[in-house]
Amino acid sequence: MTDKVDQLDEQSLSSYLEAHIEGFEGPLQAQKFDEGQSNPTFLLLAKSGKYVLRRKPPGVLLPSAHAVDREFRVIRALADTDVPVPTVYHLCEDDAVIGSAFYVMSFVPGKVYSDQALPDMNNDDRRAMTQELIRVLAQIHSVDVEAVGLSDYGKAGNYFERQVNRWTKQYRAAETETVPAMEKLMSWLSDNMPADAGQISLIHGDYRLGNVMFEADGTRMLAVVDWELSTLGNPLADLAYLCMYDIGMVDLSNDERTALGLPSEAEVVQLYCDLRGLPGIDNWHFYSAFSHFRLASISQGVYKRALDGNASQKNAIEAGEGVKLLAQKALQIIDEAGAG
Protein backbone atom coordinates (compact mmCIF):
# COMPACT_ATOMS: atom_id res chain seq x y z
CA MET A 1 0.00 0.00 0.00
CA THR A 2 1.20 3.53 -0.74
CA ASP A 3 0.08 6.70 0.99
CA LYS A 4 1.52 9.20 -1.47
CA VAL A 5 -0.81 11.40 -3.48
CA ASP A 6 1.00 10.98 -6.82
CA GLN A 7 2.03 7.32 -6.66
CA LEU A 8 0.28 3.96 -6.86
CA ASP A 9 1.45 0.46 -5.98
CA GLU A 10 1.27 -0.75 -9.58
CA GLN A 11 1.85 -4.43 -8.90
CA SER A 12 -0.80 -4.66 -6.18
CA LEU A 13 -3.26 -2.59 -8.20
CA SER A 14 -2.74 -4.71 -11.31
CA SER A 15 -3.50 -7.92 -9.41
CA TYR A 16 -6.60 -6.37 -7.88
CA LEU A 17 -7.99 -5.09 -11.20
CA GLU A 18 -7.37 -8.44 -12.91
CA ALA A 19 -9.63 -9.98 -10.27
CA HIS A 20 -12.36 -7.32 -10.46
CA ILE A 21 -12.56 -6.02 -14.06
CA GLU A 22 -13.50 -8.43 -16.81
CA GLY A 23 -10.82 -8.55 -19.50
CA PHE A 24 -8.27 -6.50 -17.55
CA GLU A 25 -4.77 -7.80 -17.98
CA GLY A 26 -1.58 -6.45 -16.45
CA PRO A 27 1.10 -5.49 -15.87
CA LEU A 28 0.29 -1.79 -15.75
CA GLN A 29 1.97 1.58 -15.55
CA ALA A 30 0.27 4.50 -13.80
CA GLN A 31 0.83 8.09 -14.92
CA LYS A 32 -0.73 10.92 -12.94
CA PHE A 33 -2.58 13.60 -14.91
CA ASP A 34 -1.74 17.21 -14.12
CA GLU A 35 -5.47 17.97 -13.94
CA GLY A 36 -7.56 17.01 -10.91
CA GLN A 37 -7.00 19.25 -7.89
CA SER A 38 -9.46 17.39 -5.68
CA ASN A 39 -9.35 13.72 -6.65
CA PRO A 40 -5.99 12.62 -8.11
CA THR A 41 -6.48 11.04 -11.54
CA PHE A 42 -4.21 8.53 -13.28
CA LEU A 43 -3.82 7.06 -16.74
CA LEU A 44 -3.38 3.30 -16.48
CA LEU A 45 -1.42 1.70 -19.32
CA ALA A 46 -2.12 -2.02 -19.16
CA LYS A 47 -1.59 -4.97 -21.47
CA SER A 48 -5.35 -4.99 -22.08
CA GLY A 49 -5.52 -1.28 -22.97
CA LYS A 50 -5.83 2.18 -21.45
CA TYR A 51 -7.95 3.03 -18.42
CA VAL A 52 -8.41 5.99 -16.08
CA LEU A 53 -8.39 5.77 -12.28
CA ARG A 54 -9.80 8.42 -9.93
CA ARG A 55 -9.01 8.17 -6.23
CA LYS A 56 -9.66 10.01 -3.02
CA PRO A 57 -6.51 11.72 -1.77
CA PRO A 58 -5.04 10.00 1.27
CA GLY A 59 -4.89 11.62 4.68
CA VAL A 60 -7.41 13.55 6.78
CA LEU A 61 -10.20 14.90 4.54
CA LEU A 62 -13.05 17.37 4.96
CA PRO A 63 -16.48 15.85 5.65
CA SER A 64 -18.44 14.80 2.50
CA ALA A 65 -15.57 15.81 0.18
CA HIS A 66 -13.89 13.68 -2.52
CA ALA A 67 -16.96 11.49 -3.08
CA VAL A 68 -15.63 9.10 -5.71
CA ASP A 69 -18.50 6.73 -4.95
CA ARG A 70 -20.99 9.38 -6.05
CA GLU A 71 -18.98 10.04 -9.20
CA PHE A 72 -19.06 6.35 -10.03
CA ARG A 73 -22.80 6.13 -9.42
CA VAL A 74 -23.81 9.10 -11.55
CA ILE A 75 -21.55 8.21 -14.50
CA ARG A 76 -22.94 4.67 -14.51
CA ALA A 77 -26.52 6.02 -14.35
CA LEU A 78 -25.92 8.28 -17.37
CA ALA A 79 -24.57 5.51 -19.59
CA ASP A 80 -27.72 5.23 -21.73
CA THR A 81 -28.68 8.93 -21.82
CA ASP A 82 -27.79 11.70 -24.26
CA VAL A 83 -25.12 12.99 -21.86
CA PRO A 84 -21.67 11.85 -23.07
CA VAL A 85 -19.76 10.07 -20.28
CA PRO A 86 -16.98 7.46 -20.03
CA THR A 87 -17.78 3.83 -19.23
CA VAL A 88 -17.20 2.96 -15.57
CA TYR A 89 -15.87 -0.51 -14.72
CA HIS A 90 -15.33 -0.83 -10.98
CA LEU A 91 -15.59 1.03 -7.67
CA CYS A 92 -13.24 0.03 -4.85
CA GLU A 93 -14.04 1.35 -1.37
CA ASP A 94 -11.36 -0.71 0.37
CA ASP A 95 -8.59 1.67 1.46
CA ALA A 96 -6.16 -1.24 1.79
CA VAL A 97 -5.73 -1.61 -1.99
CA ILE A 98 -4.03 1.71 -2.81
CA GLY A 99 -4.56 3.77 0.35
CA SER A 100 -7.97 5.29 -0.46
CA ALA A 101 -11.19 4.59 -2.34
CA PHE A 102 -11.07 4.75 -6.15
CA TYR A 103 -12.88 3.80 -9.33
CA VAL A 104 -11.76 2.83 -12.81
CA MET A 105 -13.33 3.98 -16.07
CA SER A 106 -12.62 3.89 -19.78
CA PHE A 107 -10.00 6.10 -21.39
CA VAL A 108 -11.63 8.59 -23.76
CA PRO A 109 -9.27 9.65 -26.59
CA GLY A 110 -10.39 13.26 -26.60
CA LYS A 111 -8.89 16.63 -25.80
CA VAL A 112 -9.34 18.87 -22.76
CA TYR A 113 -8.91 22.61 -23.29
CA SER A 114 -7.49 24.55 -20.36
CA ASP A 115 -7.52 28.02 -21.96
CA GLN A 116 -11.09 29.35 -22.15
CA ALA A 117 -10.12 31.72 -24.96
CA LEU A 118 -9.38 28.66 -27.19
CA PRO A 119 -6.40 30.38 -28.86
CA ASP A 120 -5.69 27.54 -31.32
CA MET A 121 -9.22 27.53 -32.76
CA ASN A 122 -10.75 29.63 -35.51
CA ASN A 123 -13.81 31.78 -34.83
CA ASP A 124 -16.31 29.25 -36.20
CA ASP A 125 -14.89 26.45 -34.07
CA ARG A 126 -14.78 28.61 -30.94
CA ARG A 127 -18.44 29.44 -31.31
CA ALA A 128 -19.37 25.86 -32.16
CA MET A 129 -17.54 24.50 -29.12
CA THR A 130 -19.18 27.05 -26.83
CA GLN A 131 -22.60 26.16 -28.21
CA GLU A 132 -21.82 22.47 -27.71
CA LEU A 133 -20.84 23.20 -24.11
CA ILE A 134 -24.21 24.85 -23.46
CA ARG A 135 -26.15 22.19 -25.41
CA VAL A 136 -24.72 19.38 -23.29
CA LEU A 137 -25.38 21.35 -20.10
CA ALA A 138 -29.03 21.61 -21.11
CA GLN A 139 -29.01 17.83 -21.73
CA ILE A 140 -27.68 17.19 -18.23
CA HIS A 141 -30.46 19.31 -16.77
CA SER A 142 -33.04 17.47 -18.87
CA VAL A 143 -32.16 13.97 -17.62
CA ASP A 144 -35.14 12.10 -16.14
CA VAL A 145 -33.57 11.39 -12.75
CA GLU A 146 -36.24 8.90 -11.77
CA ALA A 147 -35.80 6.91 -14.98
CA VAL A 148 -32.02 6.60 -14.49
CA GLY A 149 -32.25 5.74 -10.79
CA LEU A 150 -31.06 9.06 -9.36
CA SER A 151 -34.26 10.30 -7.70
CA ASP A 152 -32.56 9.97 -4.29
CA TYR A 153 -29.28 11.55 -5.43
CA GLY A 154 -30.00 14.82 -3.60
CA LYS A 155 -32.57 16.60 -1.49
CA ALA A 156 -35.51 18.47 -2.99
CA GLY A 157 -36.19 22.13 -2.23
CA ASN A 158 -34.20 24.94 -0.56
CA TYR A 159 -31.19 24.14 -2.72
CA PHE A 160 -29.31 27.41 -2.37
CA GLU A 161 -30.03 27.67 1.35
CA ARG A 162 -28.55 24.22 1.86
CA GLN A 163 -25.62 24.96 -0.42
CA VAL A 164 -24.73 28.23 1.30
CA ASN A 165 -24.83 26.41 4.64
CA ARG A 166 -22.77 23.50 3.31
CA TRP A 167 -20.02 25.57 1.74
CA THR A 168 -19.90 27.90 4.74
CA LYS A 169 -19.23 24.86 6.93
CA GLN A 170 -16.64 23.56 4.46
CA TYR A 171 -14.96 26.94 4.42
CA ARG A 172 -14.91 27.13 8.22
CA ALA A 173 -13.46 23.63 8.43
CA ALA A 174 -10.56 24.68 6.17
CA GLU A 175 -10.23 28.31 7.32
CA THR A 176 -6.66 29.46 7.93
CA GLU A 177 -7.22 33.18 8.45
CA THR A 178 -10.06 35.71 8.58
CA VAL A 179 -10.89 37.06 5.11
CA PRO A 180 -13.17 40.13 5.50
CA ALA A 181 -14.57 39.85 1.97
CA MET A 182 -15.64 36.24 2.61
CA GLU A 183 -17.28 37.20 5.89
CA LYS A 184 -19.29 39.94 4.18
CA LEU A 185 -20.19 37.68 1.25
CA MET A 186 -21.41 34.81 3.43
CA SER A 187 -23.60 37.20 5.39
CA TRP A 188 -25.08 38.74 2.21
CA LEU A 189 -25.87 35.36 0.65
CA SER A 190 -27.69 34.22 3.78
CA ASP A 191 -29.71 37.44 3.94
CA ASN A 192 -30.62 37.65 0.24
CA MET A 193 -31.72 34.13 -0.67
CA PRO A 194 -34.13 34.23 -3.65
CA ALA A 195 -37.38 32.33 -3.40
CA ASP A 196 -36.95 28.70 -4.44
CA ALA A 197 -38.38 28.47 -7.95
CA GLY A 198 -38.99 24.75 -7.53
CA GLN A 199 -36.52 23.81 -10.25
CA ILE A 200 -34.89 20.46 -9.61
CA SER A 201 -32.60 18.53 -11.92
CA LEU A 202 -29.35 16.65 -12.02
CA ILE A 203 -26.55 19.20 -11.80
CA HIS A 204 -22.86 18.61 -12.44
CA GLY A 205 -21.49 21.03 -9.86
CA ASP A 206 -18.23 21.86 -11.66
CA TYR A 207 -19.33 22.16 -15.29
CA ARG A 208 -16.76 24.10 -17.31
CA LEU A 209 -14.48 23.75 -20.32
CA GLY A 210 -11.76 22.04 -18.29
CA ASN A 211 -14.09 19.22 -17.24
CA VAL A 212 -15.27 18.12 -20.67
CA MET A 213 -13.51 16.34 -23.52
CA PHE A 214 -13.89 17.24 -27.18
CA GLU A 215 -12.86 15.41 -30.30
CA ALA A 216 -9.14 15.88 -30.85
CA ASP A 217 -9.82 17.44 -34.24
CA GLY A 218 -13.44 18.53 -34.00
CA THR A 219 -16.07 20.38 -32.00
CA ARG A 220 -18.21 17.47 -30.79
CA MET A 221 -18.08 16.72 -27.07
CA LEU A 222 -17.02 13.16 -26.22
CA ALA A 223 -17.34 13.10 -22.43
CA VAL A 224 -18.25 15.09 -19.33
CA VAL A 225 -15.92 14.18 -16.46
CA ASP A 226 -15.25 15.10 -12.80
CA TRP A 227 -18.73 14.54 -11.31
CA GLU A 228 -17.56 14.79 -7.69
CA LEU A 229 -19.84 17.73 -6.87
CA SER A 230 -22.90 16.47 -8.74
CA THR A 231 -26.26 16.31 -6.98
CA LEU A 232 -29.92 17.15 -7.49
CA GLY A 233 -30.55 20.86 -7.29
CA ASN A 234 -31.26 24.10 -9.06
CA PRO A 235 -29.77 24.00 -12.59
CA LEU A 236 -29.08 27.74 -12.51
CA ALA A 237 -26.16 26.97 -10.20
CA ASP A 238 -24.46 25.10 -13.06
CA LEU A 239 -25.18 27.85 -15.57
CA ALA A 240 -23.87 30.60 -13.30
CA TYR A 241 -20.75 28.59 -12.53
CA LEU A 242 -20.08 28.02 -16.24
CA CYS A 243 -20.40 31.73 -16.92
CA MET A 244 -18.16 32.60 -13.99
CA TYR A 245 -15.44 30.13 -14.88
CA ASP A 246 -15.36 30.27 -18.66
CA ILE A 247 -16.33 33.93 -19.13
CA GLY A 248 -15.80 35.85 -15.90
CA MET A 249 -12.31 34.45 -15.31
CA VAL A 250 -11.11 35.27 -18.82
CA ASP A 251 -9.81 38.82 -19.11
CA LEU A 252 -11.68 39.73 -22.32
CA SER A 253 -14.19 42.50 -22.99
CA ASN A 254 -17.44 41.71 -24.80
CA ASP A 255 -16.00 43.30 -27.95
CA GLU A 256 -12.89 41.12 -27.72
CA ARG A 257 -15.05 38.03 -27.20
CA THR A 258 -17.12 38.91 -30.26
CA ALA A 259 -13.98 39.36 -32.34
CA LEU A 260 -12.89 35.84 -31.35
CA GLY A 261 -16.30 34.32 -32.07
CA LEU A 262 -16.96 33.77 -28.36
CA PRO A 263 -20.40 34.66 -26.95
CA SER A 264 -20.93 37.13 -24.13
CA GLU A 265 -22.41 36.04 -20.81
CA ALA A 266 -25.78 37.41 -21.89
CA GLU A 267 -25.65 35.34 -25.09
CA VAL A 268 -24.76 32.19 -23.16
CA VAL A 269 -27.68 32.73 -20.79
CA GLN A 270 -30.05 33.38 -23.70
CA LEU A 271 -28.96 30.26 -25.59
CA TYR A 272 -29.44 28.17 -22.48
CA CYS A 273 -32.89 29.65 -21.89
CA ASP A 274 -33.82 28.93 -25.52
CA LEU A 275 -32.69 25.30 -25.22
CA ARG A 276 -34.66 24.77 -22.01
CA GLY A 277 -37.70 26.88 -22.89
CA LEU A 278 -37.14 29.44 -20.14
CA PRO A 279 -38.44 33.03 -20.46
CA GLY A 280 -35.42 34.49 -18.65
CA ILE A 281 -33.63 34.44 -15.30
CA ASP A 282 -34.34 36.74 -12.36
CA ASN A 283 -31.79 37.43 -9.58
CA TRP A 284 -28.85 36.52 -11.81
CA HIS A 285 -26.49 38.50 -9.56
CA PHE A 286 -27.28 36.15 -6.66
CA TYR A 287 -26.49 33.01 -8.67
CA SER A 288 -23.29 34.58 -9.96
CA ALA A 289 -22.18 35.72 -6.50
CA PHE A 290 -23.00 32.29 -5.07
CA SER A 291 -20.82 30.61 -7.73
CA HIS A 292 -17.87 32.79 -6.77
CA PHE A 293 -18.47 32.02 -3.09
CA ARG A 294 -18.62 28.27 -3.65
CA LEU A 295 -15.40 28.27 -5.70
CA ALA A 296 -13.75 30.36 -2.99
CA SER A 297 -14.74 27.74 -0.41
CA ILE A 298 -13.41 24.94 -2.63
CA SER A 299 -10.18 26.89 -3.13
CA GLN A 300 -9.81 27.28 0.63
CA GLY A 301 -10.02 23.49 0.95
CA VAL A 302 -7.34 23.07 -1.73
CA TYR A 303 -5.16 25.61 0.07
CA LYS A 304 -5.61 23.86 3.43
CA ARG A 305 -4.68 20.50 1.90
CA ALA A 306 -1.58 22.15 0.41
CA LEU A 307 -0.55 23.36 3.85
CA ASP A 308 -1.17 19.86 5.21
CA GLY A 309 0.82 18.26 2.38
CA ASN A 310 -2.16 16.42 0.82
CA ALA A 311 -2.81 18.59 -2.26
CA SER A 312 -2.96 16.93 -5.66
CA GLN A 313 -1.13 19.69 -7.55
CA LYS A 314 2.02 21.59 -6.68
CA ASN A 315 0.46 25.01 -7.39
CA ALA A 316 -2.37 24.36 -4.90
CA ILE A 317 -0.75 26.79 -2.45
CA GLU A 318 -1.79 29.62 -4.80
CA ALA A 319 -5.45 28.84 -4.09
CA GLY A 320 -5.19 30.81 -0.85
CA GLU A 321 -4.90 34.10 -2.71
CA GLY A 322 -7.70 33.03 -5.04
CA VAL A 323 -10.12 32.88 -2.11
CA LYS A 324 -9.76 36.61 -1.52
CA LEU A 325 -10.01 37.52 -5.19
CA LEU A 326 -13.16 35.44 -5.72
CA ALA A 327 -14.89 36.91 -2.68
CA GLN A 328 -14.03 40.45 -3.79
CA LYS A 329 -15.35 39.76 -7.30
CA ALA A 330 -18.63 38.44 -5.86
CA LEU A 331 -19.07 41.61 -3.82
CA GLN A 332 -18.39 43.67 -6.94
CA ILE A 333 -21.14 41.81 -8.83
CA ILE A 334 -23.56 42.46 -5.97
CA ASP A 335 -22.70 46.16 -5.88
CA GLU A 336 -23.01 46.55 -9.66
CA ALA A 337 -26.51 45.02 -9.46
CA GLY A 338 -27.43 47.62 -6.84
CA ALA A 339 -28.07 44.86 -4.31
CA GLY A 340 -25.31 45.56 -1.84
Image (cartoon, helix red, strand yellow):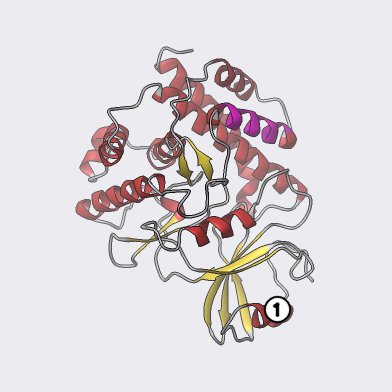
Q: Which residue is located at x 74 percent, y 48 percent?
A: 61
**Residue kind at label 1, given as amino acid type:** Tyr
Point out the stretch of residues depicted in magenta.
161-172
98 relative to 123 in the view: left or right: right
From the top left corner, tell me how far across and down residue 66 is, in percent: 65, 51
Q: Is residue 179 above or below residue 241?
A: above
The local crowd at label 1, few if under 14, some if 14 to 19, many if 20 or more residues have their Cα within 10 Å, is some
Residue carrying label 1: 16
Image coords of residue 36 (percent x, y): 57, 56
**Which residue is farthest front?**
147
Location of residue 30 (image quadrant): bottom right
Q: Does the magenta stretch include residue 169?
A: yes
Q: Quadrant of the N terminus?
A: bottom right
> Does the rendering let one see residue 313?
no
Residue 144: x and y in percent read 42, 48
Residue 259 image point, x, y percent: 21, 42
